[in-house]
């Protein structure tokens, strides 16, 4: 099954192109197409050395099972082993809670790539649904900023004090 998303960069997202992913059996392939507006943008740049600024689709496949099916700029934002385990647990919980309608679905590399909220994603690359309103793919999966944890701890202590 082919999966797609639109790729943006920056805090005020600027569309860069479209990312596609397809898995057939054990073979995973991705394709990227720079948008015409990005190629005309005076501030444009190649997202990574293996993704030069040219029009037309560019393809990338994993040569081994240890390699990513994505270009370097996208494989860099893929979750590591620990992140994948957390995503698997969240996915299993959603299926158990009935949030996911497809009980037989399995996660693939594309799912792992887009599962992380743009709110907590490190770097400038952002992913949006293709053919939709441009909202983040993983809308609603927000995590608190680390610098707010101290405030949460203080609020919890204050709540304990008020109970006594």
Image (tube, rainbow, N blue to C red):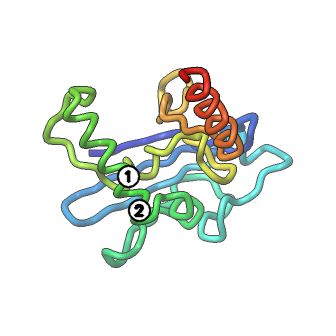
Q: Residues within 10 Å of mark 1 (few under 14, many from 20)?
A: few
Q: Is residue 37 above or below residue 135?
A: below
Say what secondary structure mark 2 lies in.
helix
Is 95 left, or right, of 157 in this rendering? left
Q: Residue furthest right?
A: 42
Is 47 left, or right, of 140 in this rendering? right
Is 129 left, or right, of 119 in this rendering? left
Residue highlighted by disc 1: 86
Q: Is residue 89 above or below residue 162?
A: below
Residue highlighted by disc 2: 82
Q: Position of residue 100 (x, y in %)?
A: 25, 30
Look at 45% across and 64% down and name the residue there. Answer: 80
Q: Position of residue 94 (x, y in %)?
A: 28, 34
Say what secondary structure mark 1 lies in.
helix
Which quadrant of the view contains residue 45? bottom right
Q: Residue furthest left?
A: 104
Q: Is residue 29 above or below residue 139?
A: below
Residue 28's mark?
A: none
Q: Residues within 10 Å of mark 2 (few under 14, many from 20)?
A: few
The quadrant in which the C terminus is found is top right
Q: Is there CB contact under 8 Å for labels 2 and 1? A: yes
12 or 153: nearer the viewer: 153
Look at 29% across and 42% down and name the residue there. Answer: 91
Q: Is residue 137 above or below residue 53?
A: above
Q: CA distance from mark 2 to mark 1?
A: 6 Å
Q: Position of residue 68 (x, y in %)?
A: 42, 68
The quadrant in which the N terminus is found is top left
The number of discs equals 2
Q: Position of residue 79 (x, y in %)?
A: 47, 59
């Amino acid at each position: 099954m082919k999966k797609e998303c639109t790729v943006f960069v920056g805090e005020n997202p600027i569309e860069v192109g479209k990312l596609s992913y397809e898995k057939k059996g054990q073979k995973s392939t991705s394709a990227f197409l720079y948008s015409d507006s990005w190629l005309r943008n005076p501030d444009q740049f190649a997202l990574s050395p293996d993704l030069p600024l040219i029009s037309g689709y560019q393809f990338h496949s994993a040569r081994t099972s240890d390699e990513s099916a994505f270009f370097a700029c996208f494989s860099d934002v893929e979750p590591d082993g620990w992140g994948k385990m957390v995503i698997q647990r969240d996915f299993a919980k959603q299926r158990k809670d009935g949030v996911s309608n497809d009980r037989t679905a399995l996660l693939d590399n594309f799912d792992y790539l887009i599962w992380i909220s743009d709110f907590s994603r490190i770097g400038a690359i952002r992913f949006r649904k293709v053919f939709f309103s441009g909202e983040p793919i993983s809308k609603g999966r927000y995590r608190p900023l680390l610098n707010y944890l101290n405030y949460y701890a203080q609020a919890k202590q204050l709540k304990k004090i008020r109970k006594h």
